[in-house]
Amino acid sequence: NAGVMQNPRHLVRRRGQEARLRCSPMKGHSHVYWYRQLPEEGLKFMVYLQKENIIDESGMPKERFSAEFPKEGPSILRIQQVVRGDSAAYFCASSPDINYEQYFGPGTRLTVT
Amino acid sequence: DQQVKQNSPSLSVQEGRISILNCDYTNSMFDYFLWYKKYPAEGPTFLISISSIKDKNEDGRFTVFLNKSAKHLSLHIVPSQPGDSAVYFCAASVAAGNKLTFGGGTRVLVKP
């Protein structure tokens, strides 16, 4: 059973470009979470999605950030008009149900130049 | 406002000895607690969890203790091995499977 997959592993964008981060949950998992880790800090919750639904986006910045988890395909975290402060590691986690621990992917390291 | 705190940024321990990692929380609504281990350039790996109805949970070399009155939990690793050298994160949620609130991490170095 493959783990949580994230791609790309590394992404470099210039200021003002768009970044798209993809997450494929573990097989059988329908709950997806996105977290961000800034340098030398802990992980911070961004958004929680189930198939076709955003359940909790309380950690998402109000502008430029969006997330989706379509019926088919991976979950996508989209950052428009990136700025240097968006440089971070973005982790996706999945769980099979609400009462289970979350399993994390390897992360996408976004660098904004 | 940091709801989950790991006050020791680093810990050094001799191989074979016990590693004790501490975590404090302020939100009394938290009822599920987890520990994750993280190597550089990798995602966090789940280690062990505990719900608020228990005060201890053990899995092999890892034991988590929960003191609800003190809003404190700890992770014991016995015996410590060089492969345990990593950053350890404490995390909490209002309900299992809900969003996780992480501490800042403790970097553990196990010396051979």
Image (spheres, rainbow, N blue to C red):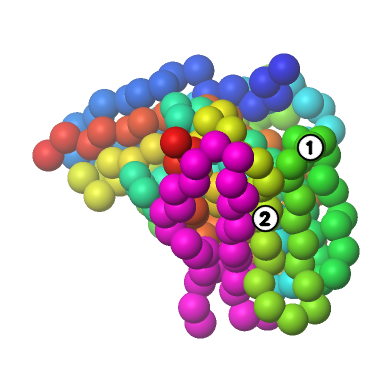
| Element type at mark 2 | strand
Residue B67 drawn above or below residue B39: above
Magenta stretch, residue numbers:
A1-28
Residue B49: x, y in percent? 60, 50
| Chain on which label 2 sits | A
Measuring 72% from the left and 17% from the top, which residue is drawn there? B1
Left or right: residue B77 compared with residue A66? left
Q: Amino acid at mark 1?
A: Glu
**Does A61 appear above or below B38?**
above
Q: CA distance from mark 1 to mark 2?
A: 13 Å
Q: Which mark is residue A63?
A: 1
- Residue A77, position as x, y percentages in the image: 67, 55
- The answer to whether marks 1 and 2 sit on the same chain is yes
Let me know if residue A64 is in the magenta part.
Answer: no
- Image position of A9 with respect to A15: above or below: below
Circle 1: element type? loop
**Circle 2 is placed at which residue position?**
A77
- Count of marks placed on residues: 2
